[in-house]
Amino acid sequence: MIELDGSQGEGGGQILRTALTLSMITGIPFRIAKIRARRQKPGLLRQHLTAVRAAAEICGAQLAGAEAGSLSLEFVPGKIRGGDYTYAIGTAGSCTLVLQTVLPALWFADAPSTVLVSGGTHNSMAPPADFLIEAWLPLMRRMGVTTQLELLRHGFYPAGGGQLRATVEPSPKLQPLDLHERGDLREVRAVSVVAGVPANVAKRELGVVAAELADLGPAFVGMESDLRGLPSNEGPGNALLLALGYEHLTEMFTTFGEKGVTAERVAQRLVAGVRAYCAGTAAVAEHLADQLVLPMALAGAGAFTTTQLSSHLTTNCEVIAKFLPVEFAIESAPGRHTIRVT
């Protein structure tokens, strides 16, 4: 039984999600106290409880403390079983974070699986569905994973109502990934998604992005811009996304419209993040780095460079090392950090 302190490091839900994933894969039980102790609303919220129950169903685990608001949990896993699974968060809680918990375990299942999750697909506290599909999943395929993700319906905060479906083939042997450089920039795509929000908001956002980033080079001058209008019953919601397609990876940046915040201000937030990334040389930005350490640890080797060494990432490394016989070596230089798994 591994004992975990949910208040360590960044003190958020990632500690729990990583523990669930690795407990399922390794068969090692764990007990966690002070769940999400550093958050404004500590304990298990709906999306965390959905992830716990999904993990328990997939591996037939025994649970103690799996209830809303609980600050502690005991998880004793069984065998991972492939199959067809459906989970409803019931709020705008993140579908992507639930999938993040169960997909790596299903790579080690005894049969193919499908997972349908309903809830939030686009909110500011989690990677949006587009990020997993365009940035994360291609790298997983390079590591030997056979998984498809489909965005069936958008779900914005606070209404939710979105749907994501994953189709998973067992991939029990992951290949190491070395991702030190971006390579040449080949494509820039900006998309503004609006549902129940005037199309003019999207046009203004895309206009600011095009104007503010044009000095970064020819790829930005010729960037694709797409206004994606959704049915009003999928909103209200607005997401602004920009994908940078490099030779070795795709990075994606996202900002979200908010009541009382102008379209220009929303676009400027995205511009700031893109400019900071383009000013550096590391391969991946902060959020993609968070998503790479666990699959690399499952492969037993690999390395990548990142623009930012967040407490989210270092805490995740500490939890992973409790379950797997791996070590993380971190070398830092101004604006560029190398994470190596051995």
Image: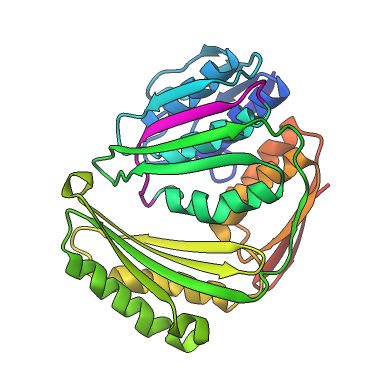
Do we see residue 37 in this rendering?
A: no
Q: Nearer the viewer, residue 309 or 147?
A: 147
Q: Where on the picture, by quarter, is residue 67?
A: top left
Q: Which image quarter is the N terminus in?
A: top right
Q: How is the image coloured?
A: rainbow
Q: Which residues are magenta?
A: 109-124
Asked if 128 appears above or below 61 in the picture, the reply is: below
Left or right? Give the position of 173 relative to 234. Answer: right
Left or right? Give the position of 325 relative to 253. Answer: right
> Where is residue 94 shown, x and y percent of the image?
40, 40
- Residue at image location 36% in from the left, 72% down from the top: 225
> Where is residue 45 shown, x and y percent of the image?
38, 30
Q: Nearer the viewer, residue 137 or 179?
A: 137
> Where is residue 241 shown, x and y percent of the image?
40, 63
In the rendered structure, does residue 121 fall within the stretch colored magenta? yes
- Residue at image location 48% in from the left, 29% down from the top: 115
Q: Residue furthest bottom?
A: 215
Left or right? Give the position of 183 relative to 207. Answer: right
In the rendered structure, does residue 139 fall within the stretch colored magenta? no
- Residue at image location 54% in from the left, 46% down from the top: 10
Q: Nearer the viewer, residue 45 or 116?
A: 116
Asked if 15 appears above or below 252 in the picture, the reply is: above
Do we see residue 133 in this rendering?
A: yes
